[in-house]
Image (spheres, rainbow, N blue to C red):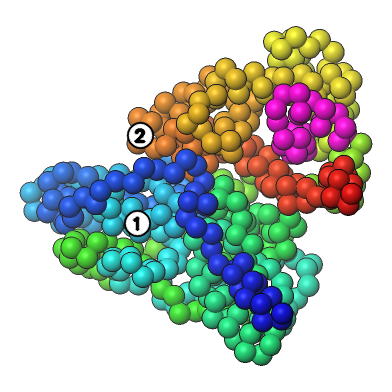
Amino acid sequence: MSRLLLILCLLAALPLSVSARVAGPPEVGSQARSARDLPTIRSSGELRVLVNQSRNSSGSVKGQSIGVEYHRLRAFEQYLNRNARDGRSLRLKIIPKAKDQLLGALQRGEGDLVAPGELLNVRTGHDVSASTAIRREVPLVLVSKQGNRHYRSLEQLAGRSLSLPAGSAVGEALRVINQQLADRKLPPIVVEWVDPSLAVEDVLEMVQAGIFERTAVELPIAERWAKVMPKLRVDKHLILARDGDMKWFVRPDAPMLRASIDRFFSSYQSPADQDVAFQRVYRRLYKVHSPLGRTERQRLERVRPVLQQHAEQQGFDWLMLAALAFKESTLNPSARGASGATGLMQITPAAARSVGVSNIQNLDGNVQASSKYLAMIRRNFFNSPQLNERERMAFVLAGYNLGPQRVQSLRAEARRRGLNPNQWFFQVERVAMEQMGMGVVSYVNAVNKYYLAYDRERYLLEPQRQRLTAN
């Protein structure tokens, strides 16, 4: 029985299938295209770069680069143009993908170059060519919240869990560590593969908030985000692995492109001020905090019946309404905001009147107006069957914050750029970041994180479900 339990725990640590972890509607596979080496790329005038969609790797806010790969890629673009024999300039086309889809997209010819900005595991079946190392022997370290328990060794993590984003290199490292723990008859470290709407920086933010207990990331990433998330604790002495190198990737039949990349990296040095814009942007941003503290739980319990009633009437998950209420008012029915916004859901009188509700001063009317207004946005603007339910709700939330017409214009611009207009997370939100800044992006992300925090403890938050299970 103990051996069976160990096998089940090890299986739980394996990543989910790719299809289960795609953040938006999965893209239709295409036939592999012929390779484009440097001469073909130059003649086309465009270098197609597949980037990790994480904001850490490739984010840009109002023209300010906050993604670690953007500086290297722009420098590489300038390098290629300086060395062009025909004088024709080459431009980059940035193609964001989920981290674990990058190498497959490269093999299919959807891009010429992969620049992940993180460690990227090359598994069997990925026939790709890696560049010279950008950074060698990158440590994977434990990260938790300041004040949490200190661990002196990895053995003390036996039986505990790590929250990891899809594609994390830590998954491979844990296979080795868990085998060592099994040899010593210790339980494995279990992986909680988080929702695909969360990238590495989102997981770190939720660790800082105390929603997740701990994670593990590349040391450079941990140190970078610790500058803007001061409650993070980076345990540099707890190294899960340090044998991975950060690299770029091309197809094996693009040797000239690969050679150009290696020559570029032989002399490239990262600018000393490359994180100035990153720190300036993110220090101003609202950071989530746990909605599951004792006081927060008591507030939620007081408003739970009315949230459940109106969520059921309008076809919403009541915990999504709770997450929105926590973001808007920290579950305070007496809250007052700007532009006449009021109550638990911070809805305005004009929005309430548009759905036939006149009294938003009491709790029931406030939640009724908000849920009907959300339902109206969903019905009139985001009812397409091409949207999966998670993305549909993200668009509805963006519309609640920004106005649905403006969100539709962002989708149209995303489509024009070749991004997925049916995926808010990491796709349409990129247009919002570039055009308007982080306001609506932070808003949707915060509500999503509060929802995921509630959903993890749904069993404890729904007493009627507990009674049904007991019966």
Q: Position of residue 338 (x, y in %)?
A: 75, 23
Instruction: In the rendered view, tell whether residue 222 sits above or below residue 303.
Output: below
Front position among marks 2 and 1: 1
Label count reads 2
At horizontal 54% and vertical 36% (from top left) the residue drawn is 388
Residue 121 percent across, percent down from the top left: 42, 68
The residue to which callout 1 is attached is: 104
Does residue 224 belong to the magenta stretch? no
What secondary structure is the stretch in magenta mostly built from?
A: helix
Q: Residues within 10 Å of mark 1 (few under 14, many from 20)?
A: some
Give the alpha-carbon distance from disc 2 to disc 1, as whole Å: 21 Å
* C-beta proximity under 8 Å, tags 2 and 1: no
* 238 lies left or right of 322: left
Q: Residue 284: which quarter of the image?
A: top right
Q: Which residues are magenta?
A: 303-326
Residue at image point 82% right, 27% down: 309
Q: SS of the residue at dot 2?
A: helix
Q: Residue 313 in magenta?
A: yes
Q: Is 332 situated left or right of 412 in this image?
A: right
Q: Which residue is mark 2?
A: 417
Looking at the image, which residue sits at the far bottom?
184
